[in-house]
Amino acid sequence: MEKKSGISADEPQEWLKKVLTKKELGHIKFNYFRKGLLSLNVDSSSWLYSLNLQKESLLEKLKKCSSEIKEIRLRIGEVK
C-alpha cells in the first residue's frame, strides 16, 4: 500500500536499523511516518527517557538516511 508521501512503511524501519542498536530496536516499534514526522512507540518509561536524551543525535543520523524527516515523536505504547 502506497502512502501519500510516496514512502513505503518498510523504509522508515530500514532507517531505524541503520541508526539504532539491536538492543534499542527491541524496545521500539515504528508507528507511522507522515509529513516529516516519524512516530515511534517505546515499551517503557525508562526507554522513553533514554531515547529522548538521544533524540537530537538520532534526528541528525536519520536525516542522513532521508531528508524528509523533520521530527521524531516518541510515546509509550505496545511494542511487538
Image: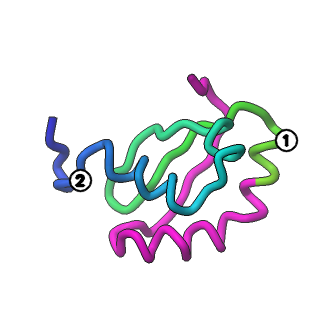
Compute the Cα span from label 1 to label 2. Answer: 31 Å
At x 37%, y 62%, the residue is 36
At x 16%, y 49%, the residue is 4
Q: Which residue is mark 1?
A: 46
Q: Is residue 50 magenta?
A: no
CA neighbours of label 2 inside 10 A, class few (<14), some (14 to 19), many (20+): some
Q: Position of residue 72 (x, y in %)?
A: 54, 58
Q: Position of residue 70 (x, y in %)?
A: 44, 69
Tell me, yes or no, whether the two marked residues, 1 and 2, touch with CB atoms within 8 Å: no
Q: How is the image coloured?
A: rainbow
Q: Which residue is mark 2?
A: 7
Q: Is residue 54 magenta?
A: yes
Q: Is residue 4 left or right of residue 38?
A: left
Viewport quadrant of the C terminus = top right
At x 15%, y 35%, the residue is 1
Q: Is residue 3 left or right of residue 70?
A: left
CA neighbours of label 1 inside 10 A, class few (<14), some (14 to 19), many (20+): few
Mark 1 or mark 2: whose residue is earlier in sequence: 2
Q: Is residue 21 left or right of residue 2?
A: right
Disc 2 marks which amino acid? Answer: Ile
Question: Taking 53 as reference, is 50 above or below it?
Answer: above
Which of the two residues, 29 or 37, is positioned nearer the viewer here?
29
Residue most toward the right? 46
Q: Secondary structure at mark 2?
A: loop
Q: Position of residue 26 (x, y in %)?
A: 65, 36
Disc 1 marks which amino acid? Answer: Ser
Q: Secondary structure at mark 1?
A: helix
Span highlighted in magenta in the image: 51-80
